[in-house]
Image (cartoon, rainbow, N blue to C red):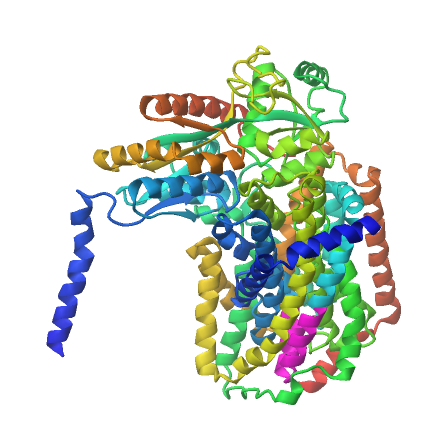
Amino acid sequence: MLETLHNLAVGFSVALSPPVLLYAFVGCVIGTLVGVLPGVGPLAGISLLLPATFGMDATRAIVMLAGIYYGAMYGGSTTSILMRIPGEAASVMTCIDGYAMARKGRAGAALAIAAVGSYVAGSASVIGLMLLAPPLAAFALRFGPPEYFALLLFGLLVLAYMSSGSMLKSLAMAALGLLLGMIGIDQMSGYFRFAYGVVELGDGLGVVPVAVGLFGLAEILATAGQAVPPKVIEPRLRELLPSRAEWRDAAAPIGRGTVLGFLVGIIPGSAHIISSFVSYALEKKLSKRPEEFGHGAVAGVAGPESANNSATSGAFVPMLALGVPSGPIPAVMLAAMMVHGVSPGPLLIRQQPELFWGFIASMYVGNLVLLILNLPLVGLFVNLLRVPYPYLYPAILTFSILGVYAVNGSVVDVWIMLAMGVLGYILRKLGFETAPIVLGVVLAPMIELALRQSLAMSDGHYAIFFQRPIAAALLAVGLGMMLLSLRSFIRRGLDWRARMALAEKGES
Amino acid sequence: MIAVRVVLFVVLALVALSPPAIAQDTFPSRPITIVAPFPPGGVADLTARPVAAAMEKALKSPVGVVNKTGAAGAVGMQSVAVAKPDGYTLLLALSSISIIPEADKIFDRKPAFTVDQFAPIALISADPTVLVVPADKPWKTAKDFIEDARNRPGQISYSSSGIYGTLHMAMELLSHAAGIKLRHVPHAGAGPALTAILGGHVDALASGPAVVLPHIKAGKLRALAGWGDKRVAALPDVPTFKELGYPDAEFYIWAGLFAPKATPEPVLSKLRATVREAVNDPDFKTAMDKIETPIAFKQGEEFQRFFDADARRLAAGVRKVGRIETK
């Protein structure tokens, strides 16, 4: 412990040295801008800017890239809340209640809660990273394909909590999402599925174009189709900050989101995406007023936003402790280290203590920088809502197309986004919710790959899921949760879902 | 007003028409783009950037790198195959350039591109893969491994960067040469494949030496043999499969620079001369040193021979794997 403190002191001396501090700040600013640009998430931001760091000193480069990473996670919530455009897959859930809050004139509160939640989650998870990295990393590596598959099944259970309306409709949408997720190269045989000769479809439908289309574009189309244009929400200064009641509602979800996100984040792979989905479901399950979800529940913003930020730090655990490229973003960071002549690996902490501890300390500093940067910006961002729709929406459309194009430089992605926008509009008119589609598109390829890898490992024997303790335990818990929800479904009959449906009937 | 428009039109027309006329004699007269068909941070990207920087220095004209990713590199490679053959769009391809068209053939689909759509400029690097196993596995030598695999066909598993990917092909060439059958567990990229073996979920992996070296040094993985013509410099005690009597198990993750086929010969020779100068640039050498990738410069006949032999081996490998029928 004393040694850790000593190391941390060394780390802070690195992180607070003016040049490193400057790069952390620059990284945070760039990250925030990248996150605010619709469609461009942390992975795209970090990949696009990686080459720019090639000429720098190793510690500065890594610190700046990390700044871009969590800066983009912060920034991603902004467009989700204000315009219902998810900056990346992890902010899809924020679109639902964050945007609903904005419609009620609480955009400032939602942004402030997202920023504070992200700060708490970011800082707390760095402590977790610092103290628990080596033992946790070894545990995280035990997550192979069978464990991953069991974990992802939890993702499917989340579906039950995603809609506030008809269960049947939300399952239909999830099925549609899972089907859309089947597009692309079959990882086990190399066969192109549903690509129709378009090479770009070999990678499947990107989550970002799908989410931006289904949420953002559909929203724009729906607004444009209204006979009477919606009133511009004029935010007042004293309404910028969350009320006391809103803080109270946000506190516990922030705490739970932090722990949940960190745990999901350390698992190698792309599971961090589902951390915000799982957090949303958890909050809805625990909430005393689940009917508020989808209509501006504070917990629906606080939980997922905290979860996706602490998942960010969680993802660094295997990378820093073991030098394992445990996900797409850590893989890019490891490449950046190699370019700078740092050999990432299990010996990194011992061989490069200044880099490791400087990095840890800079994450504390960076999170604080982001909070200081973002809170005053809340006022500025909220004022974007004053712009009349005839100017605002074409601008958003332009930025969405630019953002989605910039990620892969692919026109096909732009077409996917536009097609999804039209689909989202039609589904909305028919009263379907689109969030389950996004969940399906996220989960389908991951579940499929994990299942088939597991079966390849076991030569086709399903017993592999029960012989491995972690996988078996996860499956048992999942099964238990499903049975529990079935019981309440049968016994109570009229739960909140049914009450909601009745209330909706009354309204129309 | 009309006069202004006419003048504007004439100026624009001149601007639009002039570059090709000039380009003929003074190549390059505008920036050159190198397409890296993989994301930033991958081998192709990390090689392309120092190459671009060194070429820029030699040409005294801008050279940029664009990452055009998708479908295991096919998207970027196809884009260069059909690009205007004027020397301003180049491709930094890896070994997979010879694999993808073969895999397309297996599925009777129209290939995204074919190898003869490209004119080779130079081979930049060639890194032989090495066979690694978790350090707690019983196999101490490649001989142990192969013998055990022979006794238990289909029982020893390995991870790869993906079906028909480079790491898969390396293993298949070995299986073919040694007459063994291994169990393939494809992963979505080289990173996840490495994570899988470090977690003990598979028994073996063929990998570029640089990424596994730290784990070998830390005692987590053991290197048994290499696919190269010579031993890997950083692993002097690890024999090659060639030494062990499997000359067909030869495989490199190589990176080479290509132009579209119809690029005029004067432009190609200028590019070849530039790359020759670039690979001797001290900054380029330092950059390649940092990513621990040995420079293996080859041009003209020599590169063509290497490329043809490699393509032949890989084509045979892909055909041997054939179409995978899953249960």
Quadrant location of the C terminus of chain A in the rendered image: bottom right
Q: Main secondary structure of the magenta part?
A: helix
Q: Quadrant of residue B277?
A: top left
Q: Residue at x 44, y 64 (%)?
A: A402
Q: Is residue A310 left or right of residue B107?
A: right
Q: Position of residue B270 (x, y in %)?
A: 26, 35
Position above or below: A88 against B210 = below
Region rendered in magenta: A94-117
Front-lying residue, A224 or B68: B68
Position above or below: B225 against A21 = above
Q: Position of residue B99 (x, y in %)?
A: 47, 31
Front-lying residue, A56 or B105: A56
Q: Residue at x 84, y 58 (%)?
A: A481
Q: Position of residue A460 (x, y in %)?
A: 72, 33
Q: Position of residue A53 (x, y in %)?
A: 51, 51
Position above or below: A473 against B178 = below
Front-lying residue, A325 or A476: A325
Residue B299 can be seen in this image? yes
Front-lying residue, A482 or B143: B143
Q: Is residue A201 left or right of residue A448?
A: left
Q: Residue at x 17, y 55 (%)?
A: B17
Q: Is residue B253 magenta?
A: no
Q: Is residue A71 left or right of residue A153?
A: left
